[in-house]
Image (tube, rainbow, N blue to C red):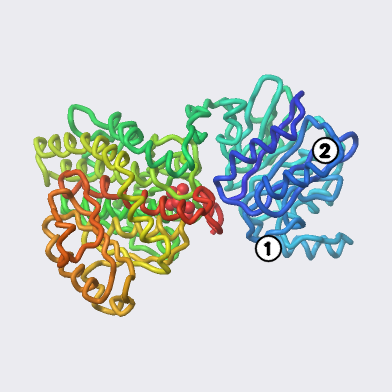
Amino acid sequence: MCGIVGYIGAKECTAILVNSLKKLEYRGYDSAGIALFEDDRIKTVKAKGKIDEGLMKRLAEEPHFTATAGIGHTRWATHGEPSDINSHPIGNGRVSIVHNGIIENYRKIKEFLTDKGYGFESQTDTEAVAKLLDYNYNGDPIDTIIKTIADIEGAYALGIMFREHKNRLFAARKESPLIVGKGNGEMFIASDVTAILEYTREYYLLEPGEIADITSDGVKFYDIHKNRIEKELQTADWDISAAEKGGYAHFMLKEICEQPDALKKTINPRIKDGVPDFSECGLTDEKLRNYHHIYIVGCGSAMHAGMVGKYVIEKLARTPVVVDIASEFRYRDPLLAPDDLVVIISQSGETADTKAALELANSIGADTLAIVNVVGSSIAREAKMVMYTLAGPEISVCSTKAYMVQAAFMYLLAFRVAYARNAIDEAECRQLIAELAEIPSKVQQCVDDQAQYQKVASKLMSADSLLYIGRGLDYALSMEGSLKLKEISYIHSESYAAGELKHGTISLIEEGMPVIAVATQHDLYKKTMSNIKEVKSRGATVIMVCSEDMKFDEADNDSPVDYPVMLPLARDLLMPLVAVVPLQLIAYYTAALKNFDVDHPRNLAKSVTVE
Ligand code: G6P
């Protein structure tokens, strides 16, 4: 989604703004721009397309200029197509703004301003805010901003410049996140901390309804009544190397390789005396015993991690779990009650639908537990209980390590729910934890064995369409495998419960169509094998991801499996954590072989902050 940066200090800032914008490329965008104070005017340079192809070329065409303050933006189009004119910053010479979010009443504002004689050039909702700021301008920027935000509805994070106040930048937010970075004689604005990590790790988190008045020496914060607010300085514990590629071809590959480490960081601090411990967030055994229902809600890969959670919690704790896609949950009037637990999973902590689902659960009085990666994010702050996944920044749009640690958290939760409800005893709980602690080394073995995934990828890269099949936990995993492939390789794929194929989908199988069968569950192996034979006999090329004790003779012409991918052994229940690695790497190599922009897949955004 869109990204915001801003700089004010003593240094020439074009390069700083562009560099910070590049750090936000991972969020997904289709145009970029900057606005700077140059002498007595606001100079704007912006262009459709990626920073290197659009904005950088435009900047190279400009006559030499210097500036020490400005704002910048990467836009992911919502209102109006990706184009130069719709790119941010947007303004009229007196005011210039960058905006994340959606202004819901922008038409009304436009009509009002059109009546007052304003013209509009772009198709954006943002232009309505820029022109309203201009209309409300009375020489005092804070008054002007307060008056303006009182009239706008929707979600926003704004970076604002007024031509007449060239030593100041302003920022305001509601819903969409925004921080103010503090350097030495320089200050920053950013929609997420990775944009400015190279310059500072110290920042203030802007809360909804707050306004920042920023100079190179510091920042003053105001509420909507113009009262001054004191805020605490935060320190990011992510360092810059975590947000850089470090020699890998892509962030996605780097993050896949970081998974053993990410798992340890997530799991180890949550184990006390050999069993999972949730006391850091106040989730007691008494609460776990008393919840009537458990809901798990998220979007995309986070929801898929929830699917693993459902299988594992139900299996171990014999407690029903409902997994919901956040955008469905929020509108389907769920049967929630105050004695239910709603587990909200989100890497970014900012996904609009997931946040709305959390707000709904809070409003009904249910207990809410957020499992979030980004510290201080909206979901982390709004949930009644929060546990961080501690995976470090995930830059690749296609989620890998965040899914891995979310799924790992599902196991910790499942073990504790089962233990609290006496469905397993302490010895069994300890045994499960001991086996979970072995998983990072098995993930490492998969990561080290990349040749076999490259071989499979070379078979998939020319496919138009394929299927992932599995049963039980393997079905949950198939969903994630299929999503990874389609996100970055643009090959159509679907995941199917293997036993359901016969009820329609098998008609799609034709000669040479790849089917990736996930078969890690020994009790379901024979059943899945029957389904594999069904697709094989109809011409499918079968890739089977299975445990290493499920042996195949590759020379056997009768084998229904064309390409077996063998996994190190672990308890069946834990296998999703191991088996997801080949699925991630198969997707990665397929997209890389097709020469696609793996880290920035078309049309996708890292953090979907609009509905
Ligand atoms: C986007 C990302 C996905 C992610 C989903 C949920 O669609 O591209 O990778 O799984 O949002 O994001 P969240 O930050 O809430 O986990």
Furthest residue toward top: 184
Given residues 576 and 166, the one toward you in this image is 576
Q: Amino acid at mark 2?
A: Asp
Q: Is residue 173 left or right of residue 311?
A: right
Residue plotted at (33% across, 59% down): 479
Quarter of the rendering containing residue 201: top right
Q: Position of residue 367 (x, y in %)?
A: 34, 47
Judging by the rendered image, the residue that carries numbered circle 2 is: 140
Q: Residues within 10 Å of mark 1 (few under 14, many from 20)?
A: some
Residue plotted at (67% across, 61% down): 79
Residue 356, visible in the rendered structure: no
Quarter of the rendering containing residue 66: top right
Residue plotted at (83% across, 49% down): 134
Residue plotted at (40% across, 58% down): 483
In the displayed structure, 317 sits above or below 125; it is above
Judging by the rendered image, the residue that carries numbered circle 1 is: 81
Single out the mark in the foreground, 2 or 1. Answer: 1
Label 1 beta carbon less than 8 Å to ligand 1? no
Q: Quadrant of the C terminus?
A: bottom right
Q: Residues within 10 Å of mark 2 (few under 14, many from 20)?
A: few
Callout 2: SS: loop
Q: Position of residue 531 (x, y in %)?
A: 19, 70
Given residues 74 and 442, the one toward you in this image is 442
Callout 1: SS: loop
Marks 2/1: CA–CA distance: 34 Å
Q: Position of residue 524 (x, y in %)?
A: 14, 61
Which labelled disc corresponds to residue 281?
A: none
Quarter of the rendering containing residue 8: top right
Q: Amino acid at mark 1?
A: Glu
In the displayed structure, 162 sits above or below 558; it is above
